[in-house]
Image (tube, grey):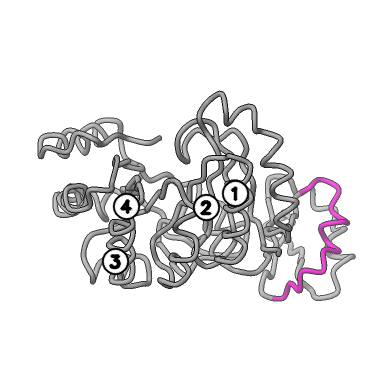
């Protein structure tokens, strides 16, 4: 069993309890306008170009047979233009680049290869009460691979988290649900129209899957990205509070302040992404104070 892995982040402290190994799978059905991992949206490998590392040596252009790399003189300076749509992922330009300015996003890995890395950190999991978190992308879009990873972690006595938008087929969620100790569910924005406009999908399936998790008695941490000017509204915060009250299996709520890191990562793989304003320290405190004043005590800012 294999899948495209975007990244494996060891010793993470933000993706569940304790020290964790976060495994990011490639591919997501949502297209959130503020996505902080835009390179995870495509289900296929992509070419990443990091301009700051480029020395304009043109070795990539010499190695490429598809005309992906073009060097254009503008105002007396050489500009490296990358035609991502022409790339066939042959890897020739990556091998030719002497500075590491080019790399492939998305690496095929087996369950065994992933678990070898995971097991290297067993002492850290035990000491910190941590474990493994499967993230993405969207883990529910990779049910076979995710199930095998979860089962292997269970056999090794490793705590298992799945971070998900909740947007996935019920049968996929049902296949993995008994192998998950804790779900980290990303609650994007309140309202059918707004959810469709800013994520590209309806929240109906997500609501149905939330009800399923409650019926199964599965522990959930609600994670809420907050983007100034988009969902930093009383209506959305009220929606978050109501979620916490309605779903008794929600153990805690985390507010995730927007940051701009996704903008540069989107450009590196040939995508465009809208830029939003990062919140101030005072705004973050205001969010927290509002929710707490409404009786939501199990809420915090996750930086």
- In this rendering, the answer to whether 236 lies above or below 206 is above
Q: Of the two numbered discs 4 and 3 on the same chain, state the one appearing first in sequence.
A: 3
Question: Which residue is identified by label 2?
Answer: 135
Frontmost of labels 4 and 1 is: 4
Q: Which mark is residue 217?
A: 4
Q: Of the two numbered discs 2 and 3 on the same chain, state the one appearing first in sequence.
A: 2
Disc 4 and disc 3: Cα gap in Å? Answer: 26 Å
Left or right: 78, with 284 as reference point = right
Q: Of the two numbered discs 3 and 1 on the same chain, state the one appearing first in sequence.
A: 1
Frontmost of labels 3 and 1 is: 1
Which percent across, then down, holds residue 227?
A: 32, 50
Q: Nearer the viewer, residue 143 or 303?
A: 143
Q: Are marks 4 and 2 in contact (CB under 8 Å)?
A: no
What secondary structure characterizes most of the magenta part?
loop
- In this rendering, the answer to whether 203 lies above or below 274 is below
Disc 3 and disc 1: Cα gap in Å? Answer: 26 Å
Q: Are marks 2 and 3 in contact (CB under 8 Å)?
A: no
Q: Residues within 10 Å of mark 3 (few under 14, many from 20)?
A: some
What residue do we see at 85% from left, 69% from top? 64
Left or right: 205, with 175 as reference point = left
Question: Which residue is identified by label 1?
Answer: 23
Label 4 secondary element: loop
Which percent across, then down, holds residue 16?
A: 45, 39
Label 1 secondary element: strand
Magenta extent: 86-100
The verdict on residue 80 being magenta is: no
The verdict on residue 94 being magenta is: yes
Frontmost of labels 4 and 2 is: 4
Label 2 secondary element: strand
Which percent across, then down, holds residue 290?
A: 14, 38
């Amino acid at each position: 069993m294999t899948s495209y892995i975007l990244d494996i982040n060891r010793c993470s402290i933000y993706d569940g309890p304790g020290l964790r190994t976060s495994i990011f799978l490639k591919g997501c059905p949502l297209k959130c306008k503020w996505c902080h991992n835009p390179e995870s949206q495509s289900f296929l490998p992509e070419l990443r170009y990091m301009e700051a590392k480029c020395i304009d040596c043109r070795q990539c252009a010499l190695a490429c047979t598809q005309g992906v790399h073009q060097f254009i003189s503008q105002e007396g300076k050489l500009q490296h233009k990358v035609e991502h749509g022409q790339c066939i992922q042959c890897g020739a330009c990556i091998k030719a680049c002497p500075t590491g300015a080019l790399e492939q996003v998305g690496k095929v890995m087996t369950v065994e290869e992933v678990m070898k890395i995971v097991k290297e950190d067993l002492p850290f999991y035990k000491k910190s009460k941590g474990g493994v978190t499967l993230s993405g992308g969207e883990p529910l879009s990779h049910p076979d691979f995710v199930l095998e990873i979860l089962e292997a972690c269970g056999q090794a006595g490793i705590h298992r988290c799945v971070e998900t938008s909740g947007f996935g087929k019920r049968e996929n969620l049902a296949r993995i649900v008994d192998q998950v100790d804790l779900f980290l569910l990303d609650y994007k924005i309140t309202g059918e129209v707004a959810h469709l406009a800013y994520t590209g999908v309806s929240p109906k399936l997500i609501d149905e899957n939330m009800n399923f998790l409650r019926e199964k008695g599965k522990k959930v941490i609600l994670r809420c990205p907050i983007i100034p000017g988009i969902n930093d509204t009383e209506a959305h915060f009220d929606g978050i509070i109501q979620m916490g009250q309605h779903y008794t299996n929600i153990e805690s709520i985390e507010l995730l302040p927007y940051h701009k890191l996704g903008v540069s990562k989107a450009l590196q793989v040939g995508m465009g992404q809208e830029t939003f304003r990062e919140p101030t320290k005072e705004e973050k405190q205001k969010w927290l104070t509002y929710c707490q004043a409404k009786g939501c005590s199990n809420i915090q800012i996750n930086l």
